[in-house]
């Protein structure tokens, strides 16, 4: 199993703190099965339904003031960034939770080649230039 990056661990700790607040607000309406230890739950402790998750994701995107994207596009962006970083396809498969490596290979591995990587590097240098960026 891969070690959890520090920024992910911090985000999960923050989520636990927020969930404790949600539990306090919900009071007697909080309900979570004893064998469930959900980190991401509904406002009353239950499982999140996919439609509700998408609505929440949309609200967070709007609040952040960034261009609206779907959850599916966010996953695709994650896969593309993993390919850009030359993450091994089996690792990307595990992160993206693809049951078949062919899905990971077909959709993400061809996306970024050396010429694209070089172009992005040059663009990053340009944007970091104090006279320009």
Image (tube, rainbow, N blue to C red):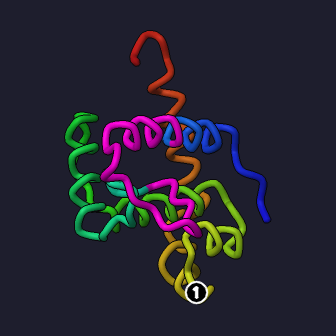
**Residue at the image point whose x is 24% and y is 62% from the top:** 52
- Where residue 61 appears, as percent x and y from the top left, is 26, 44
- Residue sitting farthest toward the front: 28
Q: Nearer the viewer, residue 53 or 115?
A: 53
**Residue at the image point whose x is 34% and y is 68% from the top:** 72
Q: Nearer the viewer, residue 58 or 20?
A: 20
- Counting other residues with Cα less than 10 Å from the Cα at mark 1, is it few (<14), some (14-19), or many (20 or more)? few
Q: Is residue 80 magenta?
A: no
- Where residue 33 appears, as percent x and y from the top left, is 49, 67
Placement of the C terminus among the 4 image quadrants? top left
Tell me: 39 left or right of 94: left
- Where residue 16 appears, as percent x and y from the top left, is 53, 42
For label 1, the residue is 99
- Residue sitting farthest toward the top: 131
**Residue at the image point whose x is 30% and y is 61% from the top:** 53
**Residue at the image point whose x is 25% and y is 39% from the top:** 66
Q: Is residue 25 magenta?
A: yes
Total marks placed:
1
Element carrying mark 1: loop
Asked if residue 114 is positioned above or below residue 122 in the image, the reply reads: below
Placement of the N terminus among the 4 image quadrants? bottom right
Q: Nearer the viewer, residue 133 or 92?
A: 92
Q: Which residues are magenta?
A: 16-40
Tell me: 84 left or right of 111: right
- Where residue 99 appears, as percent x and y from the top left, is 58, 86
Asked if residue 54 is positioned above or below residue 9 in the image, the reply reads: below
Q: Nearer the viewer, residue 120 or 4?
A: 4
């Amino acid at each position: 199993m891969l070690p959890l990056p520090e920024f992910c661990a911090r985000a999960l700790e923050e989520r636990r703190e927020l969930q404790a607040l949600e539990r306090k607000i919900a009071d007697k309406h909080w309900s979570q099965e004893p064998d469930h230890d959900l980190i991401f739950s509904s406002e009353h402790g239950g499982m999140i339904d996919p439609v509700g998750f998408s609505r929440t994701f949309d609200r967070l995107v709007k609040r952040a003031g960034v261009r609206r994207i779907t959850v599916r596009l966010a996953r695709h962006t994650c896969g593309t960034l993993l390919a850009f970083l030359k993450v091994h396809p089996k690792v990307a498969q595990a992160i993206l939770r693809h049951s078949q490596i062919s899905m990971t290979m077909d959709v993400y591995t061809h996306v970024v080649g050396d010429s694209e990587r070089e172009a992005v590097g040059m663009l990053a240098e340009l944007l970091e230039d104090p006279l320009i960026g």
